[in-house]
Image (cartoon, grey):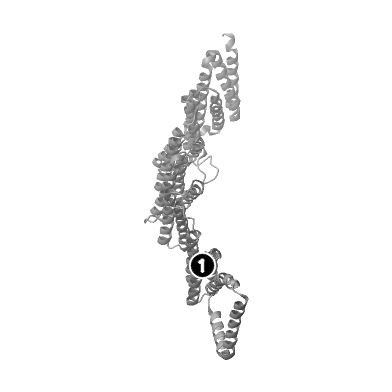
Amino acid sequence: WPDGFVLPTVLVVVSLLYLSGALWLKQSALLLPALASFNLLIYALNREIWTAAQLDLALLLSYLTAGTLMLLAGQFLPKRWRGWRWPLLFAGAVVIAGSYLISFNMRWEYTTTASLTTAVLLLAFAWWYRGRLQMGPRALPLLSYAGFLVLYIAQFVVIAGLGEGRDSTSWPLLTTPFAAGCLALSWLLQRQSIRPVYGTPLRFSGLAFLIIPLAAATAYGEYVIIGYSFALGALAVLIDALLRRTSVELTGALVLLFAGYELTVWQLPEHRPVFIALAACLTLTYVALSWLRLTHPYRDELRLVGLMAAVIPLAEAVARGLDSGWSLTTTLTLAIISATVAADAIIRRQRHEFYASLGLVVLTIWSIWLDAAITEEQAYILPLGLLLLGIGWAERHEQHQARFQMASWLGLILLLGSSFLQSLPREALGYTALASFEAFVALVIGIRAHSRHYVLAGGVALLATAVAQIGPAFIDLSRWAQLGITGTILLAAGLLALFRKEQLLATRRRLASEWRQWDV
């Protein structure tokens, strides 16, 4: 023989010796050195037969074939040889795993071949070993997940190999359909025997595989890639949720759809106001769908996602108004969100949600005033003050006295206090009239509704307004006129107290008794 074949000859002899010893002594562990020598023999023969350019492919195919044969031999040995299976399975698994890992240093075609071989073997053994190799009694097959993961990695190898020298940011356009395809294929694997082994692992693998392309599309920031990836991912998850009737997955699909829309239009700043209004319409669609006669999980999830998603266009509209000025589209966005929340509150009879919708209505009114360049403070104060008073009366109707008092005091202080401060200048006759009118109305409402704080607020505001307006004029009078007016008032009060003492005391006791019976 040529000198190059001396080492292969020695390895053949060593393999046969270990194999003979294993069979003679009936020690299956001796198969491991025999198989190790056999694998070294494969390497030595390939080194002698193939050139350096052909060696990588030859070694890869040889070891993939040898590993596959070991695994199949270990799997299908007769039952009487059951004790000899584990060395074959162990050696085959090591050879396949090593070949797969080493293939990443080779050409992408070789890596793809090793990946497909490894994935097929993993999925095949997942079926043969179903019910075993699990993390617990209810755990899903680990080999199935490993096989799908190898296939998922293989697609990146193919994309990198075919797209070498091209745009490297478009790969989410290819990996998203792969993940969606995994979900779609899982819908077909619903037989009782197949679903635990392939169907369920494929479904959860597909959901997990969506994360990477969606995150990459977001990072690259190209609106076409973002829109396509999120739309396809959301559609696949939505169909899966509807087929399986899972509310959590439905929530994820709705969130993906809305997030994809927001991230896509974020890349189009020139049309941003219109897109913000359309986002508000999308949240309206979610909430409106929840009003239909759907099953309970669908109804609740649609409403929850719709209301939570409405915060985003709301914040965007307010931020844009504060930064770039208020416009018709900003007002339209606020009006859509206000109407959505109000309608949902009325349909579901949610009192606090209705309060929030009224707050959004006030914000919409402010947007209209700001767009019209109205600078009058009372135009902004009156809607908010009346809203607080309305909330107070609603809470009083529900027998919530503490909330009634807090909301009413806030509203009264805001309305009466602002008009009083604006009425202090002498030339502010209009504000004086407004302050007097508001104080008089509060006083009348307090008397008719038997509300102490309305009477106190109205009376104090009316007195303060009178003093603020009459006081300066009284000071401008001459000293004799001031003394005369003061004396006349004191004299009249003294005579009234002298001649009507009993009647005044009785009236005071009656009013005090009635006052104590009124609401705080």
Which SS class for mark 1? helix
Where's residue 44, x and y in %? 57, 17
- The extreme top residue here reads 2
**Is any part of residue 387 visible from this angle?**
yes
**Is any part of residue 244 visible from this angle?**
no
Compared to 6, does 71 lie above or below? below
User: In the picture, which quadrant includes the C terminus?
Assistant: bottom right
Q: Amino acid at mark 1?
A: Thr
Q: From the viewer's perspective, tell me whether residue 256 is left or right of residue 413.
A: left
- The extreme left residue here reads 293
Q: Quadrant of residue 496?
A: bottom right
Count of all numbered marks drawn on residues in the image: 1
Where's residue 309, x and y in %? 47, 50
Where's residue 256, x and y in %? 46, 44
Judge the density around disc 1: few (<14), some (14-19), many (≥20) Cα neighbours within 10 Å. Answer: many
Residue lying at 41% horizontally and 47% vertically, measured from the top left: 278
- Quick one: 241 or 91, which is closer to the camera? 241
Compared to 300, does 84 lie above or below? above
Q: From the viewer's perspective, tell me whether residue 509 is left or right of residue 162.
A: right
Label 1 belongs to which residue? Answer: 432
Where's residue 223, x and y in %? 45, 37
- Quick one: 102 or 41, which is closer to the camera? 102
- Quick one: 356 or 156, which is closer to the camera? 356
User: In the picture, which quadrant includes the N terminus?
Assistant: top right
